[in-house]
Amino acid sequence: MTLGRDVLLLAYQTMRRIREFEERVNAEFVAGHIPGFVHLYSGEEAIAVGVCMHLDAADYIGSTHRGHGHSLAKGCEPKRMMLEIFGKAEGLCGGKGGSMHIADLQRGMLGANAIVGGSPPLVVGAALTAKTLKSDRVAVAFTGDGGSNQGTMFEAMNMAVVLQLPAIFVVENNGYAEGTAVEYAVGAENMALRAAGFGMPAEKVDGTNFFAVYDAMGGAVARARAGGGPSFIEAGCTRIHGHYCGDPQNYRSKQELVQARDLHDPIELFRRKVLDSGDLTAGELDSIDRSAVAEMETAVAAAHAGALPSLEALYTDVYATY
Amino acid sequence: MARISFRQALNDALRSEMKRDSRVVVIGEDVAGGAGGSGVDDAYGGIMGVTRGLVGEFGRGRVIDTPITESAIVGMAAGAAMTGLRPVAELMFVDFVGVCLDQILNQAAKFRYMFGGKARTPLVIRTMFGAGFNAGAQHSQCLYSFFTHIPGLKVVIPSNPYDAKGLLIQAIRDDDPVIFLEHTKLYDVEAEVPPEAYTVPFGEAQVLREGGDATIIALARMTHVALEAAVALEAKGIQVTVIDPRTTSPLDEETILESVAATGHLLVVDESNPRCSVASEIAAVVAERGFRDLKAPIRRITAPHTPVPFSPVLESAYIPTSAAIEGAILELVGES
Amino acid sequence: MIWAVTMPTWGLSMEEGTLVAWRVAEGCRTSIGDELVEIETAKIANRLETQHDGVLRRQVVKPGQTALCGELLGVIATDETAEAAIDDFIARYPKPQQATTRADDAPSSSDSTLVVELSSGGWLRYVTLGRHGSAVVLLHGFGGDSDTWVFNQGPIAEHHRTFAFDLPGHGGSSRQLQDGSINGLANSIGHGMERLGLERVHLVGHSVGAAIALGLCVQHPERIASVSLIAPFAFGSQANQRYVSDFTSAHRSRDVQRCLAMLFVDPKSVRRQMVEAVARYKRLDGVHEALGKIAAGVLRERAPTPELKTPADRLLLIRGMHDNIVSDGQTPVGARLETLLHSGHMPQMEEPGQVNALLLDHFADADRAGVRV
């Protein structure tokens, strides 16, 4: 499939921004500036970007605890995200949510979810809204290979099929659920095969290949918007960092960790491809690299400088009215 | 004004709100009934008939039968609420909350807070509760103390048809997640109910009866049992006040404290198990804020710390009785 | 001579009352108009007045006890009546039937509560009592209903046919209010009166009802035999704006109670069930809008002073000394003004004996004169 230059530029730029964001978060966390836990998306960028480039601001996504990549791909501002991760008052959620609960409802980002498997039923709800209000929107649930075993995932998939809702289930199979390999935890041959048994079209793609993801998602979105019901995409990838920042990753061999960086980096693979084909130049890509660095530097500086929430914020927004 | 049943009052509330606002949808198992089958549509209208007739009037786009799939029912309703619908989801028996507790506890209840005030979750979960029809341990619990405990939820427990209609209309118009609990034994109770729509505010207890000797707080079916006891006590010369909180979150502490200030004696009647119950919460509030008005220790009458037994003779012993309330009041005011 | 003192029936839904206290001791003399006994119901508290000169020979029901409407509370007799005769009177006095369980299809109020349809599509609920005598139309005030006349309609009905309307947007009348102005409201009432074939009436209006009564005088002078205005919003009165906005927006029972307490000299006369009844009315869909329309249309400005064809002596004004809700207006020269010393904004409830006597006299004067206004 041939994609135009603007699409390619946007894809590279978004993936690079995600990578730079995550690497800065990693550095800041290791330096002790970020409270709680963070779960980094580096290595999985092609999936978030390949999926979200088919979505408008009005479409919905639900995410996981590993949600920074989805948020950026859906259009959330890195500065507001960084402020939130630092627990500052100007963060996307006023500092009340943190990394695992980042949300931006105005951009259709229904929230990172700290409960594994928490998003799929909510996303099916968003799809119900879309169908009921005839808004032509679609809703995408990102889940990991670990989350794909949750009962909520299965219930949500069945519900989406039974009610024929415009929901798309994207499972990011990065090979590990915390410290347990997918070969152990998923009994079926693969997750796409399992999903097909639920009665929806299901596809398995190489999640390190932006083009493959983009292609598969195009079909799923067209189907959903046309009223054809839900789809399932299993995208295989590798995560470069641990499950959480600070994870010693003893469950992965040293060789595997090296190969993750050297052989399966989706941004490198994309770069090589577009340079080989001559669609984009090295100069353009390097320029994007530099912009991403500068943008995330600004975000981090803002996060450091940002004010803490006032103590009153502890009590606000439990209810709309009480 | 016509006398209608608790069940009919709920049906009226749903119908009038669904007419008024096209974003209100009803979701649950057999809320219509007959989906995909060879018999009639609206075969059930809800297992207790509360939603009967709605699918005929509003269609299956707004009255949505589901598979038996509570986490998807409640999760879907929560996601729909967050994105612009006003769903009324049904959890058939409150005992089933175990299979969808995450969607209530960690999702719906917390969106607004976690997302810094940007989310609005106008979700109603209607659910049946209570013992007294030999349904056994897994279909007879109360469990409203669980929900009362969770910040971000509102908990509504009507005791009569007038309140049932007004509180359900209020719940549907409310922008926060509401757990709306219906006692199984109240569906056939009748009372005068206005034909037009009206609301009953949350956080406002109702004084059902006034008397200066003691204050009884009771919920749902227990309000009726307490009123029975009040009549028996009056014949013995003891006048009691009976207060129905109507909502346990928010809880109208002021009305309770004012009454205790007037009577000096407090008895809380709660059909649920005792530990960490709403009865305990009310007792704690009064002990903390109304201590100096008390002339005697606070008493609670609850079920025992056991599951609900099946055999009718055992179940009758499980549920608090009018005689037990009478006895407790007589002891409290010192005339055993 | 022996006379029974019985539990009164105040309003249509009262079934029983509690005797709070006797104001006259057993064996003591009492005269007509004396305060005899204090009664309270869940809704309201009030005093019964002595109806016959004599001695209170027996207090049958004691303080704190409850009795059904119509039940014997005590006995008044002349000096020479024997004890045995009193005992006999008490023993034979019929005890009323208790309405324990109502049949499902029995209406909660008696068949005297009816509805008249208006051509606009709405309707007016009205309570009618009394079969003989000239017609009296009673119009309540802002946010009230025909229960305002709970201590008045019965006594007046002994001499007149009475019709207490629920104003548009109030009570059991339809909520939709086309026109919240005095003229609009008077129009609706006039229409209702026409439907009922009422050709010559004594008008009684309380507060805003008084303004409406005057509006009717302007619209249909030929139908009006006399006008009685109680705590009137009329002739340049100003309404307490704080009360109007607080009452209009009140949603919680506590807020309703605070507002109602402002109406009476003794705030404790507002009982729980009255608060509950008003709160339930306030929470009906459409009431807030209806009251808002009337507040905007009628109560923001001073009450109008219409050009009346009414002779001034056909006008009776009754005000409570301690009225916090409407200020004095300019009483028309020649009209009769009575100020009751122990009343606030609700003299018809606070001093009903006095008000009823004044009204009945006023109606009788007009009937005797046979004058049309």
Image (cartoon, rainbow, N blue to C red):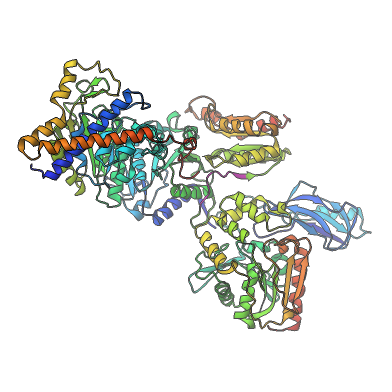
Dividing the image into 4 quarters, which one contains the N terminus of chain A?
top left
Q: Which residues, given as a range, are shown in magenta?
A: B199-207
Percent from the top left, x then y, of residue C352? 75, 63
Q: Quadrant of residue A208?
A: top left
Please give the name of the residue rendered at 71% of the width and 65% of the height, measured from the top-left corner. C152
Is residue A92 highlighted in magenta? no
Is C283 placed left or right of C89 in the picture?
Answer: left
Please give the name of the residue rendered at 76% of the width and 62% of the height, measured from the top-left corner. C351
Magenta-colored segment: predominant secondary structure: loop
Is residue B206 highlighted in magenta? yes
Q: Quadrant of residue B251?
A: top right
Q: Nearer the viewer, residue A315 or A278?
A: A278
State whether residue A215 is above or below residue C106.
Answer: above
Percent from the top left, x then y, of residue A34? 36, 27
Q: Looking at the image, can residue B325 be seen? A: no
Is C286 placed left or right of C160 in the picture?
Answer: left
> Farthest residue in the left direction?
A277
Q: Nearer the viewer, residue C346 or B94?
A: C346
Q: Nearer the viewer, residue C201 or B41?
A: C201
For the image shown, how many numbered marks are present on the structure?
0
State whether residue A163 is above or below residue A87.
Answer: below
Q: Nearer the viewer, residue B236 or A212?
A: A212
Percent from the top left, x then y, of residue A135? 27, 52
Q: Looking at the image, can residue C11 be seen? A: yes
Q: Quadrant of residue B92?
A: top left
Is B124 placed left or right of B278 in the picture?
Answer: left
Percent from the top left, x then y, of residue C372? 68, 83
State whether residue A322 is above or below residue A197.
Answer: below
